Amino acid sequence: MDKTTHRTGGIAVQRRSKKWKLVWKNWQLYLFVLPAFLSFAFFSYAPMYGVQIAFKEYNPGLGIWGSPWAQPWYRYFKLFFDSAWFTTTLKNTLTLSFYMFILGNILPLLLALMINEAKHIAFKKTVQTVTYMPYFVSTVVVVGMINLMFADKGVVNQLIQMFGGTTFQFLTSDAAFKHLYAWSGVWTGTGYGSVIYFAALSNVSPELHEAAIIDGASRLQRIYHIDIPAVIPTFVILLIMGAGSIMNVSYEKVLLMQNPTNLMVSEVINTYVYKVGILHTQYSLSSAVGLFNNIINLILLLIVNKISSKVGETSLW
Amino acid sequence: MKSFKRMAAWVLCMGLLAGTFAGCSNNGASSVTPSSSETTTSAESAESSTGVPDYMNPVGKFPITKEKITVKAMAAVNSEMAKDWNSLEVFQKLEKLTNIHWEFDYVDSKTFLDQLSIRMAGDDYPEVFLMGGMSSDTEESYGPSGKLLDLSELIDKYAPHLKKIREENPTIKLGTTALDGKIYGLPYYAESSGNVPVLSFFDEQYMKNAGVEKVPETTDELYTLLEAFRDKDPNKNGKKDDIPFSCQGVGYLRTILQPAFQGYTGGSAAGEWDVDESGKVIYLPEEKGFKEYLQYCHKMFSDKLLDSEFLTQTADQAKAKVQSGIVGFYNQTPTILAGTALEKDKQICLPPLTSATNDKKVAQAPKYLSTTNGLITKNCKHPEAVVSWFDLFYRKEGEEVEGFCGKISLLGYEGEQWKYTDSSKTKYQFIDPVKSYIQLNQTVMITFGLPAYISNKAVQVGNKLMEDKLEGGAKNQAPYYKEAYPLFVRYTKDESTEAALITTDLDNYELMMEGKFINGQESLDKFDDFLKNLKKYRVDDLKKIKQSAYDRYIKNK
Amino acid sequence: MTIRETKGDKIFGAVNAFLLILVLIFCFYPIWFVLCASISNPTLVNSGKVVLFPQGITWVGYQSLFREPMVGIGYRNTIFYTTAGTIINLLVTLPAAYALSRKDFVGRNVLTGIFLFTMFFNGGMIPNYLIVQKLHMVNTVWAMLLLGATSMYNIILCRTFFTNSIPPELQDAAEIDGCTNFQLFTRIILPLSKPIIAVMTLFFAISHWNSYFTALLYITNDNLKPLQLVLQNILVQSDVMTQMIESGQLDAGLMEESMRIKQLIRYSLIVTASLPVMCLYPLVQKYFVKGVMIGAVKG
């Protein structure tokens, strides 16, 4: 994207003046971007000075500017890294997140492709609508349902016994936790996540499909050669953005699903920090942990973006 | 590479721009603006010869102020309360009595603390904060910097009843004294007969059906009764579906069984922290009897005497089981049985038990105190009058003025909303249409925690299940109350973050192991490894911190 | 000309339909459960007795919900916030995304970087509040409409659509015709972007409809409260009461009736709050029409 060269000053000047010409020609585009720019300036950048809290001994009585700097500045980061549960919470956060990352990127695409292939419009629309409904069920209710269904005497165990198996204690099992967490997330999120792909698929011209059928292509081949290239850019972008929120495991759902016996696999960074802050609000510590999470997110995003720009055409920039 | 540099430069510029913009705006907010709070404080206001400021009448005389004044308070509300507090009977009567009018800024209690921190970030905060989940944390955050008023002198001069209560009751005095020795919070203290902490109840008829005559007093006797519950079909429905002992989580086992083996109540009362007779802070898993407690619970679990879902069921699920009659020992209040088949049976409260490792009967003491239900800020225009007003709520029965004392804020006026049903004043009853003090919140008074001192020894009659509960509490628990590691110990800023981190680390591990030992996922042969691991989780460091905090705390006695 | 299906395609179609039916059941069951639970006796629900059909039918949950006068106000406000807010969102997001998709837009990468940065770094509650306060937006409709007027996530989704679905020849053709960027955008690009506009409308509308935390912090005036805030207020017990129950000061039995109703309300709340939005989807589905692009270039 580099528009200037260093070969001769003359060409450089030419390129630069060409750029200013573009700026002048496209002045309206700057207006297009202005509202968003102002929104970010006021609501994201102006308050950003609050990030300092992570590096200070924040005292609410003295305010953000009046609070003294932490000695040393990385004190709260160090406290967090030194804590006994740091490695465990980091491992659990990443495990749950990667699991959801894979499921959450592939399954919506798969669902969109499958619905796209359905013949009857009514059936298609019904599936679309029904799969998108679970998104609106609140977390508390979802976890409540899990507790009821997977209880020792719940529906799932009853089914298992009907088929001759023995009761399995899902809710206290370390091994089952991540599956329950991830697949309940699939329940609620896949339908909603598939919506964006319908927009991408709508660009596929039916004529292409007709031509392919005449050439003798099977449905699978048509999907592979026509539909998939149409959705790849969206898929890649979502992948990159997803990498940028790996650390954001919601504490609410995990907290509700935790019980004493599964802590080794269920304690994630955000639930841990939440518990630390219960007795005495830990402003500086939670700010430091939040910053840590965000920096990791940013790094992952940049890495995945770099890989993607090397491998294909789609990337953030 | 070049575009990256350029981008970095842009971001830097944006950051600086934003910083300056925000910096200017914030400096404006934090600069001292001459406000009315600078004009009169108790030190500066002219005092009459009686020692009170000019605008007030002498202490003890009403109205409190000569002219009507208005006080602005931010108050935490919820959906159970009347929309306008000033429409409540008590507030109207008090306004006539005292000449003080309150202007309330209602904030949903869910967001109260957030709103408080937002207001305190600037200069325009209200004169008084009420309820909303404030704690000693709030006091320590804003007190030392001067945003909250030090109430020590004010209480001394204008709140004789609060002063007396603080002297009489060490818990209140210690709990409301801040780290710097000052007093910032107005406490809420409710010693009500209805305040019975977590208990274990069972149905008397079930016991008889199971063929047992005597209420258990030792852990062995309890075990026998539990086995009888399991085998003898006490609910007489022909099915072997009875759960002898059900509860929700490890916490209830700690409340009911752990003290039987260790003689300390800190298990559930203070997260396993307690203090021995010599004043030394101890961590209960390291003390005698803990292994036996785990063994007992594990045996219960494997013998199917303990609900196999005790670790995973929600409170609602546990309650539903009890209400459907299949549970022997339950830990909810008996009043949830209203409308079920067990309603008519007598519900018995399990007394504290003794065991082979412990012969002291101890029960978890109730929590009567909430330290910070009212705060007065630097912006208060008439702090002397406000403190006087609050003092009304610290009057005990017998010290009423125009029928008002602290107890009114829980029950309402005697003769209007409630009355004694016997001459010895041991029992009381609500007067129709009032059925419980929750209804009072719509018409009479906010009963949920305005700063007050409430002492109500009488037992509420008229609800049989409630009577069972209160009788059980009075007979089988109250004589054995024992305090654990005090709840209101304050940590300094340095201690606080470290303590919070170690506590979370340690508790996570200990709780997990306790659960696993009990349900068998971990064998009790590994108990010694468990004790060794506690050291790895820095239990000794935390003990040191808690010891010095405790020593500092009791020094204020 | 009819297209005959090969046997392989027929099998594919059948398997596909079968799998979709399984997915349908998998996704529908939780919804069905919520519907049943909202009219069932709470004790039976908690005992796991409500599996396929409601038990102990009671309408108390819905009755309590609609008896609250605030619910009507909440609905009214949320409809307003959703409509106005979504329009504002679209006006801010679509032009910005289009500009960023233009390769000849100088500074495009820098701006993308600046915007992206905001997804990762946040100043925290108090600084955010102070800015909103400085702008005199606290406790006004603007707090609900302008905060979150856009997000980089959505801008990027739109930008991806513009980059991949709009043929660059369109821009060249427009320039030859003497169109300004503005005319190009409004007369040519937007009409071709119906699918992404439909998707964005859906996302923004749902986000506004579910908005809770913004309102919790910034709106204290009852008249301005959105639906979710009103509903959660009805539902959630105050912390003081929970504390008092746990510490024994307040007897849970006295609260028993209201706690049962609250559980019913929790389920009926999902139904009443989500029904309108669930119905929104079928309305926008018709914009996911194939082949919208095709005529454009030829024309």
Image: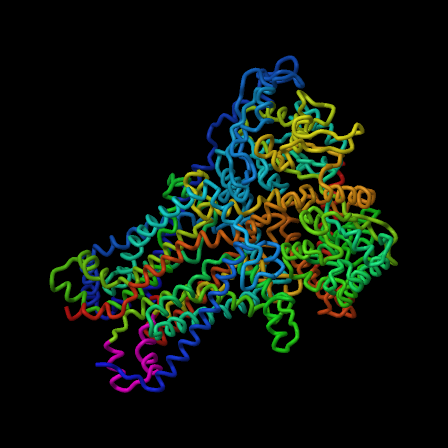
Q: Name the spot of residue B532 as percent of width and height, x first.
A: 75, 65
The answer to whether one can see residue A37 in this image is no
Q: Is residue B51 above or below residue B346?
A: above
Q: Which residues are magenta?
A: A207-233
The answer to whether one can see residue A262 in this image is yes
* Residue nearer the viewer, A46 or B387: B387
Q: Is residue B434 above or below residue B318?
A: above
Q: Is residue A216 part of the magenta span, yes or no?
A: yes
Quarter of the figure with the C terminus of chain B: top right
Q: Which secondary structure is most common in the magenta stretch? A: helix
Q: Is residue C188 left or right of residue B188?
A: left
* Residue nearer the viewer, A6 or A202: A202
Q: Name the spot of residue C28 as percent of width and height, x first.
A: 47, 65
Quadrant position of residue C12: bottom left
Q: Name the spot of residue B143 as percent of width and height, x first.
A: 60, 36
Q: How many marks?
A: 0
Q: Is residue C57 left or right of residue B465?
A: left
Q: Name the spot of residue C109 as percent of width and height, x first.
A: 31, 62
* Residue nearer the viewer, B542 or B368: B368
Q: Is residue B163 above or below residue C247?
A: above
Q: Is residue A222 above or below residue C271?
A: below
